[in-house]
Image: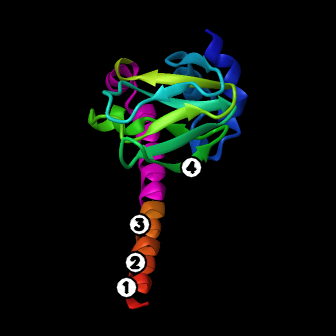
Amino acid sequence: MESIKYLSKLTMNPKFIDFTKEELKKFLSSCKVEKFNKGTMIIREGEKGDKLYIVVEGQVGVSKAITEEMVFFLTTLSEGDFFGEMAILTSHPRSANVFAKTDSTLLSFDILAYNTLKRENKLLFAKLNSVFAVTLAERLYKVEERIKLIIKASLIKDII
């Protein structure tokens, strides 16, 4: 089980501060290690998603297609960050593209493992969902701030 070697990285991650070492080991036992070369597309916007990823080495970029020719870069995710949780929680299609900005190592956690955890370890399941909820709330706040800036900029443009 190659994923267990990342236990110390999760233990030091503030997002997982409420998890015991045993809970993290249990979670890691359900994860797979996936490696991506720089430039590789990891997930594509609009595709069906069935797993989330945690960055354990490297960096990934997140982008959103505006048109077929125009892509808006959203953010860079680094060690300790995760993405793809919306697909696990809602079964909605992927909402963005994610690509490897550098050679990257990710832990993947799929929907089958998520559902197994839901049945077999309700406390760990609840803690994991709490991490997802906080992360999603933080992302929503950032999106709202961007929208506010866009609206403000368009109002200024209309005044000029």
Q: Residues within 10 Å of mark 3 (few under 14, many from 20)?
A: few
Q: Is residue 121 left or right of residue 58?
A: left
- Residue 114: percent from the left, percent from the top? 38, 25
Residue denoted by label 1: 158
Q: Is residue 39 visible?
A: yes
Numbered range of the magenta stretch: 113-140
- Residue 61: percent from the left, percent from the top? 57, 40
- Residue 107: percent from the left, percent from the top? 57, 24
Measure the alpha-carbon separation of dots 3 and 4: 15 Å
* Residue 29 in the image: above or below residue 18: above
Residue denoted by label 3: 144
* Residue 132 in the image: above or below residue 99: below
Residue denoted by label 2: 154
Q: Residue at x 58, y 28 (%)?
A: 24
Q: Nearer the viewer, residue 14 or 109?
A: 109
Q: Nearer the viewer, residue 33 or 59?
A: 59
Which quadrant would the N terminus be assigned to in this image? top right
Residue denoted by label 4: 75
Measure the alpha-carbon separation of dots 2 and 3: 15 Å
The amino acid type found where label 4 is placed reads Thr
The amino acid type found where label 3 is placed reads Glu
The amino acid type found where label 1 is placed reads Asp
Q: Residues within 10 Å of mark 1 (few under 14, many from 20)?
A: few
Task: Tell me which numbered mark, 1 or 3, is placed earlier along the sequence.
Answer: 3
- Classify residue 99 by image quadrant: top right
Instruction: Choose mark 3 or mark 4, whichever is in front.
Output: 4
> For the residue labelled by badge 3, is the local secondary structure a helix, a strand or a loop?
helix
Measure the alpha-carbon separation of dots 2 and 1: 6 Å
